[in-house]
């Protein structure tokens, strides 16, 4: 069976390609080799030689159509990734993510093909703030915080109903999406367009909402995405990781190998067809803990620099409720956070890290996002 992986030269896509090749599938990689991710301008050395590589842009109908011949399953991983950067490179993010996905769907609707399943990479960023619980009001979804709210260090959102204290809770797929960036809006567009076309034309589609994915092959030269990789690039260059707010905001960090398993299950099983599924661990981890873990594991006498600054659009807490993916696909994460971080660090020892954080931060400041 032939399988197409868009974005297959990237971090998650390349690991997925390896797993598919190992299972004996005929795999086609379609990737633009975006310079921000692949500064060398060539396929990365880790790319599986048993897969066919085609350089191309998902927005180009001719290039995309040329790789659909004989394909039965598509994993749509191609995406411009960067929450902060998306706020000032709006046209590029909408073009690559929203229009690129529209081009793929247009071909699936208007050309002859043998595609019988589409798995699309969506994002937890589309939730905005996660679910919280108030002792008086029950489950609540605080609105996105403003710079004014956080000016005096009031980082935790209050209950939107009574103004009281709230505690973070696992966020399920049924929760409403509150996009807080152009990137999150385009990821919402991707999943909703794919599911809509699937329903309309009878094509099985599964949308996987990735939480914070980390692991080997994460770009150590791209300062716009992947907090673990950004921190690691700083540490490897003997610079402290920089934390916004007080560093106690939490995210759900999932190892790339677990994300690959979720994709394979979505392909193999029909129970999740037409569904959106969270792909995370269900375990919240503070950003400060990530930074301290990397400093310690790298043997560096560095301490994270806590700025007490608010970055516009950032959420305080969001972690996954895995009930649906567990029930439909039997999925549960295998890799512990500590073990995954150890693997990431070990891999990074042979990889050059180009710390571009200061440039990315300067861009945010210039646009008034800090």
Image: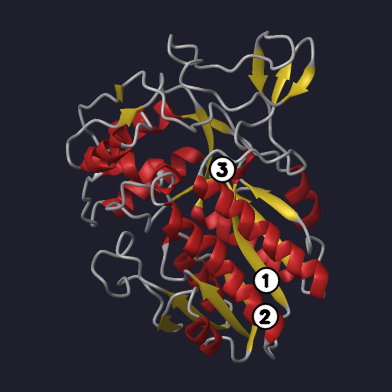
Name the residue at 47% across, 65% down: 15
At horizontal 73% and vertical 62% (from top left) the residue drawn is 195
Where residue 91 appears, as percent x and y from the top left, is: 44, 57
| Quadrant in which residue 321 is drawn | top right
| Mark in front: 1 vs 2 | 2
| CA–CA distance in space, label 1 to label 2 | 10 Å
Tell me the number on the disc at residue 42. none
Q: Which residue is mark 2?
A: 108
Closer to us: 237 or 193: 193
Q: Earlier in the sequence, mark 3 or mark 2?
A: 2
Viewer-side residue, 151 vs 118: 151
Alpha carbon distance from label 3 to label 1: 21 Å
Residue 336 locus on image (x, y percent):
52, 41
Quadrant of the drawing holding the C terminus: top left
Q: Is residue 138 above or below residue 207?
A: above
Q: Are marks 1 and 2 in contact (CB under 8 Å)?
A: yes
Q: Tag 2's secondary structure? A: helix
**Mark pair 3, 2: CA separation:** 27 Å
- Residue shown at 56% from the left, 45% from the top: 211
Q: Residue at x 54, y 23 (%)?
A: 145
Can residue 367 be seen from the camera position used here?
yes
Looking at the rendered structure, the secondary structure element under dot 3 is helix
| Residue occupied by mark 1 | 118
Q: Is residue 277 left or right of residue 101?
A: right
Q: Is residue 200 left or right of 2 when viewed as pictured?
A: right
Q: For mark 3, what is the residue?
A: 125
Give the percent coordinates (x, y) of residue 363. 28, 40
């Amino acid at each position: 069976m032939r399988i197409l992986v868009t974005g297959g030269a990237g971090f998650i896509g390349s690991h997925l390609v390896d797993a598919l090749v190992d299972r004996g599938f005929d795999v086609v990689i379609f990737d633009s080799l975006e310079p921000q991710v692949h500064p060398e301008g060539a396929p990365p050395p880790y790319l599986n030689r048993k897969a066919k590589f085609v350089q191309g842009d998902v927005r180009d109908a001719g290039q995309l159509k040329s790789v659909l011949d004989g394909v039965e399953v598509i994993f749509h991983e191609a995406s411009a990734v960067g929450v902060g950067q998306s706020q000032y490179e709006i046209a590029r993010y909408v073009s690559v993510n929203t229009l690129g996905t529209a081009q793929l769907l247009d071909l699936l609707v208007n050309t002859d093909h043998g595609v019988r399943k589409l798995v699309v990479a969506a994002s937890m960023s589309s939730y905005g703030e996660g679910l919280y619980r108030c002792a008086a009001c029950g489950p609540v979804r605080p609105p996105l915080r403003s710079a004014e709210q956080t000016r005096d260090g009031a980082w935790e959102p209050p209950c939107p109903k009574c103004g009281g204290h709230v505690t973070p809770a696992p966020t399920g797929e049924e929760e409403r999406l509150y996009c807080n960036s152009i990137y999150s809006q385009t990821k919402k567009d991707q999943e909703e367009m794919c599911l809509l076309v699937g329903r309309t034309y009878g094509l099985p589609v599964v949308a996987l909402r990735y939480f914070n994915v980390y692991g080997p092959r994460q770009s150590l030269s791209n300062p716009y995405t992947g907090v673990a990789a950004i921190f690691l690039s700083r540490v490897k260059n003997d610079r402290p990781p920089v934390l916004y707010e007080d560093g106690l905001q939490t995210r759900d960090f999932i190892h790339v190998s677990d994300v690959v398993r979720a994709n394979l299950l979505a392909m193999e099983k029909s129970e999740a067809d037409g569904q959106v599924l969270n792909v995370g661990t269900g375990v919240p981890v503070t950003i400060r803990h990530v930074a301290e873990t990397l400093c310690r594991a790298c043997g560096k006498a560095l301490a994270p620099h806590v700025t007490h600054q608010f970055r516009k659009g950032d959420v305080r807490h969001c972690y996954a409720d895995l009930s649906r993916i567990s029930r439909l696909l039997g999925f549960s994460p295998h890799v512990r956070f500590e073990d995954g971080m150890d693997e990431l660090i070990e891999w990074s020892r042979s990889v050059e890290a180009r710390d571009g954080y200061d440039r990315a931060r300067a861009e945010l400041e210039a646009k008034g996002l800090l």
